[in-house]
Image (spheres, rainbow, N blue to C red):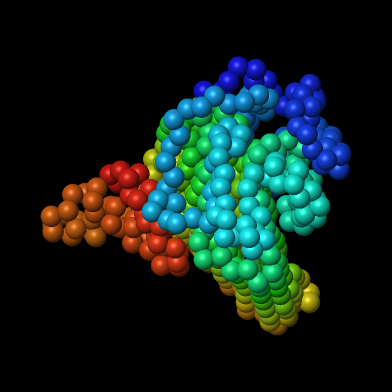
Amino acid sequence: MVASGVQTGFSQENFAAFLLERSEPNWLTDLRRDFWEEFQRRSMPTRAQEEWMRTDIRLLHLGQQEWPTTSVAQTELPSAALSTGVELAGQTVTLNGRTQSHALVARWREQGVIFGPLESIVQEHPELVRKYLLNRAVDPRYDKFSALHAACWGCGTILFVPRHVCIDAPFHTMSILSDGGVDLGHTLIVLEDGAEASVLVETASCQPHDKGFHCGATEIIQGAGSRLRFVGLQDWGSGVWHLAHQKAVLSKDASLQWTIGALGARLAKVNQHVELVGPGAECQVNGVMFTEGKQHLSYHTLQHHMAPSCRSDFLYKAALQDTSRTVWRGMIKVDQGAQKTDGYQRNDNLLLSAKARADAIPGLEIEADDVRCTHGSTTGRVDEEPIFYACCRGFTRKEAIRMIVTGFFQQVFDRITIDSVRDALGRSIARRVREYE
């Protein structure tokens, strides 16, 4: 439950109270005011716009969302899925946009690593935050929701890894919503040249059917030769509106493995972009989506090759039950000077219901003439024949379907090098599988 004193709606009055509550550098307050004006100028997206024509948010009313301006009452928190049995380098936990706990192993602090709540680090290291926050990756003026987030983010996590520091244990962050809660959390990850790290980020609700609103952003900035494994598991309650902008910027010879698990939310609209700005940069993005009920998950991906000799590989797989729907819209963009580009994108969809729907829209925008860029998409239903043969060998129908779904996702699972992540995704999907219609 959210404590009393909660204001309702993203209004000018509540925004002013929000600013008074925070003790922040003047430059950040000025930025917030600027982005708030941008938010007010922008209208809500409509289905007349190409990006939103397959995603209907008419039932989302920002004026009805609760905006906590006081502390949040404690409640029983869900357990983490990704960090179970894992030795961590650091961890942060938030509830309804408020930091509940944070920790950083002393060994890494002594090597200059900065990790913790963004709202605290901006006080301790204001110039570091100012250098990177919302000016190198995510565009606060992209749309109404990016402007809202930029103006009103209240909590978040920052990870800064100095040059050539290699961290051998993952960092973990967990964002939690109680019923009716709001989260505008921000994740900022900066790896300097030659640094290495792994980050596990997950979201969850206190109860499976809780409502809520999340409008977040993730910024990843990698220096030359840096290495990052980043995992995001979205498992909000079935009543949560999930809106997010996520962007990574990779310098020369930087490497990123980015794994996405999208399982929860009533409606999700996520923009996931990777910019390869230095020669030799490479990224691998793995996406797993599993939907049920009336869920609607929409992921728009962009592989933007801005420098020569870069490689990008995007693979998204979705399995859909009931009347749920997924939208994947991918684009490989190659600038004129980005010769020797190697870009690949693929989206496969498995329909577990005759009423489910998967939209796949791959695209290419190529201005260079010495590239290799390919894309593909498949959509189909489960064949009854393998279900029949599995049942003949003693499996129940549900067990047979579960095996088929697991096999469908295996190509993505094989890419995941972190055992806890692979196991957590497999378990989360398996327990959602129902009998095929």
Residue 162 is left or right of residue 424, and the answer is right
Q: Is residue 208 left or right of residue 43?
A: left
Q: Is residue 417 visible?
A: yes
> Is 75 situated left or right of 57 in this image?
left
Q: Is residue 177 above or below residue 363?
A: above
Q: Name the residue: 57% across, 29% down.
A: 181
Q: Position of residue 346 (x, y in %)?
A: 52, 65
Q: Position of residue 307 (x, y in %)?
A: 74, 74
Number of numbered discs present? 0
* x then y, percent, for residue 105: 55, 55
* Towards the viewer: 285 or 233: 233
- Residue found at x 24% / y 60%: 386
Quarter assignment of residue 152: top right
Which residue ends up furthest to the top in the rendered image? 4
Residue located 38% across and 48% down the image: 428
Q: Based on the displayed image, in which of its 4 quarters is residue 175 positioned?
A: top right
Looking at the figure, which quarter contains the C terminus? top left
* Residue 145 at x, y percent in the picture: 71, 39
Residue drawn 79% across and 27% down?
Answer: 20
Query: Of 61 and 427, which appears nearest the observer?
Result: 427
**Vertical comparison of 185 with 182: above or below:** below
Front residue of 403 and 52: 403
- Does the image show residue 381? no
Q: Nearer the viewer, residue 416 or 59?
A: 416
